[in-house]
Image (cartoon, rainbow, N blue to C red):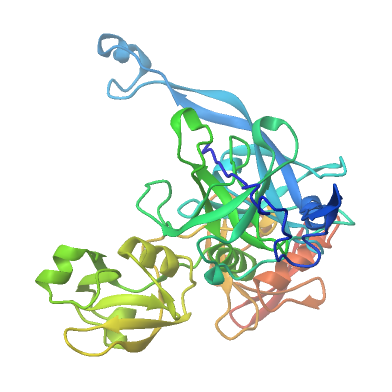
Amino acid sequence: MKKLSLLISAALISSSFTLVSLPSHAAIPLSLNGQTMPSLAPMLENVTPGVVLISVKGTHEVKQQVPDAFKFFFGNPRQNPSQERQFRGLGSGVIIDADEGYIVTNNHVIAEADEIIITLKDGRQLKAKKIGSDEDSDIALLQIDADDLQEVKFSDSDNLRVGDFAVAIGSPFGLGQTVTSGIVSALGRSGLNIENYEDFIQTDAAINSGNSGGALVNLNGELIGINTAILGPNGGNVGIGFAIPSNMVENLVNQIIEYGEIRRGVLGVSGRSVNSEIAKAMELKTTQGGFIEQVTPNSAASEAGIKAGDVITQVNGKKVKSFSELRGKIGSMGAGKIVKLTIIRADENPKVYSVKLKRADNGNIAAATIHPMLKGSELENDTNGQGVSVLKVEPNSPALLVGLEPGDVIVGINRHRTKNIAELRKSLKEQQGTFALNIVRGNRNLYLMAR
């Protein structure tokens, strides 16, 4: 499991006990020897019920190292034998939708888990099901069925500034819910080789093992990031922790909910980060940004007029310092999204290009679990908005046994219409026992019974 770390600075007041200007519900003056001090308690009382403990157990395959001389006895002499071993793990999660019971966490927290148990702050324990995940950005979406949940609202992480106060909430070392505080130490951190798409918030709020998937919030109690990793010896806190920005999380989660998968948008360029050497050689007026070395023909970038030698300095009006940061931001945006890119070209003044991202064609998608009986099917929203198209059905899968075929369009459950994957998932959640899938197959309208 990846480990995390975040620290919270206690320096909210000066040595003269002057009250720091904080949101009204975040800093309630407390009396100390006739002087006032701020407190985060009121904000935390409202937010901490939205952060949960995640316990997982499952099995994974472990390769056994066998001397070459004995490999013949285990079948293929080129392969090492393997065996399954049970594992248990702990992490944290954040409730982002109280009505639907959606919980976001890190993919590495629940990867390969056969059972996922959510422990709420009030002590309730519930089984969770995995809705979808994205290994490359380390995000996963879970769902529980419970009443009286408290959600944590998203904040716009693009508005963060270095020096903003940050509060980390999670369950380190399985001790139970713990709160630490600090500041935003840096933005747009990348090149750490922690994940494939990196655009981290760096913080000094203390994060340790078990904080993975927990919340990083601002002083308004709004989610600014999902804690994901630490940088330190032996996985311990040294005041350098990283969180996935809330905007990236929200983009990816919305794709899972709406489409049932991650539909990663691609720009269609390759390049590297601008540095002083590149700036000097190319006579650039900037030493930061993403330098474009190559533009793929017929790509989104090509169709928008972006050329090799251009430097991308902003995405939707927000600065990008490196090519890795650019890749991280674009990689979390869905296919079909229109992005405003600020380009510097040779001696020209900066110009803004409008680019419609295309869908990644490398199969790098993360399928969502709509319902156990639909497992083994690849689904997408019908282009005409009339239902859910079945693209693929795997052999010997539950979806095949139900009777689904490639080319089918699911238009309803029982006699209720469902126009997209989000509506289909919601309708299936309400079903108990046997139900009927209303299918359009060619010119025929039929029902497939399932349970």
Instruction: Residue 361: tell me if it is visible.
Output: no
| Residue 341: quadrant of the picture | bottom left
Q: How many labels does the image show?
A: 0
Depicted 96 relative to depicted 316: above or below: above
Q: Residue at x 55, y 82 (%)?
A: 383
Depicted 340 relative to depicted 365: above or below: below
Q: Which residue is drawn at 82% across and 44% down?
A: 121
Name the spot of residue 208 as percent of width and height, x first. Answer: 58, 36
Q: Give the left or right position of residue 398, taking residue 332 as reference.
A: right
Taking depth in this image into account, of 268 and 261 the one nearest to the observer is 268
Q: Residue at x 25, y 67 (%)?
A: 270
Q: Give the left or right position of residue 443, taking residue 276 as reference.
A: right
Q: Give the left or right position of residue 195, taking residue 386 as reference.
A: left
Taking depth in this image into account, of 31 and 333 the one nearest to the observer is 31
Name the spot of residue 327 as percent of width and height, x first. Answer: 37, 65
Quarter of the picture holding the C terminus: bottom right
Name the spot of residue 437 as percent of width and height, x first. Answer: 73, 68
Depicted 426 relative to depicted 307: above or below: above
| Residue 5: quadrant of the picture | top right
Taking depth in this image into account, of 43 and 270 the one nearest to the observer is 43
> Farthest residue in the top direction?
69
| Residue 379: quadrant of the picture | bottom right
Instruction: Residue 64: tell me if it is visible.
Output: yes
Name the spot of residue 424 as percent of width and height, x first. Answer: 71, 69
